[in-house]
Image (cartoon, rainbow, N blue to C red):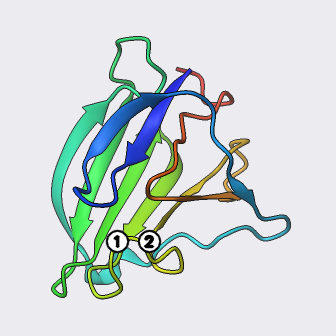
């Protein structure tokens, strides 16, 4: 299965293969970002499962200091957020990460580093 990865240095959305090891968070999960201070800077579609179809809609946001947020939605299900802080540097996992809803229950229960692989959850009908 293919998935998404955010390259830390270049901050590009790229497709990669192989499985990944996510940090799991039981209970309430990881909170989604507050995007009230961000502006939408672009939108695109991407292929998150390697089938050649761009099933995932990606929205790019940025705030004045240069922090970036990306949302990933497939079939109207928002399943991942990526956060990248310009102030803390791209490798600081405390401020630069991806959170993913692995089972489509609305809770972001997995956390990935920006250089780790992740993919569209199997529960999203695509």
Point out residue 42 in the picture as x, y percentages from the top left corner: 15, 52
User: Alpha-carbon neighbours of circle 2 within 10 Å: few (<14), some, or many (≥20)?
Assistant: many
Are discs 2 and 1 less than 8 Å apart at CB?
A: yes
Work out whether residue 82 or residue 37 is closer to the camera in this orientation and state it. 82
The relative height of residue 69 versus residue 88 in the rendered view (above or below) is above
Point out residue 14 in the picture as x, y percentages from the top left corner: 32, 37
User: Alpha-carbon neighbours of circle 1 within 10 Å: few (<14), some, or many (≥20)?
Assistant: many
Quadrant position of residue 53: top left
Q: What secondary structure is marked by label 1?
A: loop
Residue 23 showing in the rendered view = yes
Residue lying at the far top in this picture: please name it.
Answer: 51
| Count of marks, rendered view | 2
Work out whether residue 72 or residue 90 is closer to the camera in this orientation and state it. 90
* Residue on which disc 1 sits: 90
* Residue on which disc 2 sits: 96
Residue 2's label in the rendered image is none
Point out residue 51 in the picture as x, y percentages from the top left corner: 43, 11
The relative height of residue 62 versus residue 124 in the rendered view (above or below) is below
Point out residue 121 in the picture as x, y percentages from the top left corner: 62, 34
Position of the N terminus by quadrant? top right
């Amino acid at each position: 299965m293919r998935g998404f990865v955010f390259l830390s240095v270049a901050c590009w959305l790229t497709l990669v293969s192989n499985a990944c090891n996510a940090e799991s968070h039981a209970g309430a999960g990881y909170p989604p970002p507050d995007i009230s201070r961000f502006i939408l800077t672009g939108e695109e579609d991407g292929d998150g499962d390697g089938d050649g179809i761009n099933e995932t809609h990606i929205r790019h946001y940025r705030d004045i200091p240069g922090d970036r947020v990306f949302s990933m939605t497939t079939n109207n299900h928002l399943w991942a957020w990526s956060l990248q802080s310009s102030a803390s540097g791209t490798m600081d996992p405390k401020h630069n990460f991806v959170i993913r809803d692995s089972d489509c229950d609305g809770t972001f229960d997995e956390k990935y580093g920006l250089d780790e692989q992740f993919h569209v959850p199997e529960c999203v009908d695509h």
